[in-house]
Amino acid sequence: MTTLEIVTKEIVDLHDFFTEWFNGTADRDQLEPRFLSRLHEDVQFIPPEGQVLSGAFLKEGIARGYGTNADFRSKIRDVNIRYKRGDLVLATYTEWQTGSKVSAEASNARITTVLVEMTDPLTWLHIQETWLPDAVRDAGMPAL
């Protein structure tokens, strides 16, 4: 598989897991292998609102979210490799959500930049999300 295929599969699989987790349809014992084990111990997450969150905060928030949002759906599009050096890859993708209870708007879209290490499985080092403008979101919202 190419680097783009590996990274795309990782991103899509992880977001599919988030949907299952928040819907309450994932097995609770899957949190570690499908999510927690993929995060570097010093990972930082910057959501669209701009605060810098630690990996511990991210992990705790996801763990508490089990089964809290039965209507949540997401779709990943436009995965691109922006830079690759050695085992480090900088990638971007868009995430389209509906039914979100924790975002300002239930239907929203964001562009995400991630730095991952090409380990098996990939190791997430840094995640930063930015809201897509309403005009982009409204023009491109896929069926979820």
Image (tube, rainbow, N blue to C red):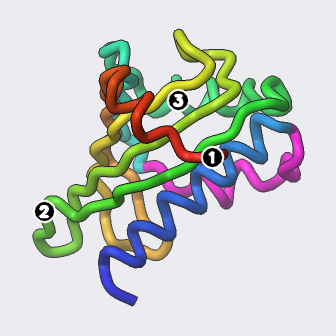
Instruction: Check the image and report above or below for 128 versus 90.
Output: above
**Quadrant housing residue 137:** top left
Mark 1 Cα within 10 Å, few/some/many (few <14, many 20+)? few
The residues bearing labels 1 and 3 have C-alpha atoms spaced at a distance of: 28 Å
Q: Which residue is mark 3?
A: 58
Q: Left of 81 or right of it: where is 109? A: right
Q: Identity of the amino acid at label 2? A: Tyr
Contact between marks 2 and 1 (CB within 8 A): the answer is: no
Q: Is residue 12 left or right of residue 139?
A: right
Query: Which quarter of the image is occupied by the C terminus?
Result: top right
Q: What residue is at 61 percent from the left and 42 percent from the top?
A: 74
The magenta stretch spans which residues? 24-39
Q: Give the overall secondary structure of the magenta segment.
A: helix
- Where disc 2 sits, the SS reads strand
Disc marking residue 143: 1
Residue under circle 2?
83
Q: Earlier in the sequence, mark 2 or mark 1?
A: 2
Label 3 SS: helix
Please check the rendered image and state whether residue 17 is part of the magenta-colored stretch, yes or no: no
| Label whose residue precedes the other's in the sequence (1 or 3) | 3
Q: Is residue 124 found left or right of 17 in the rendered image?
A: left
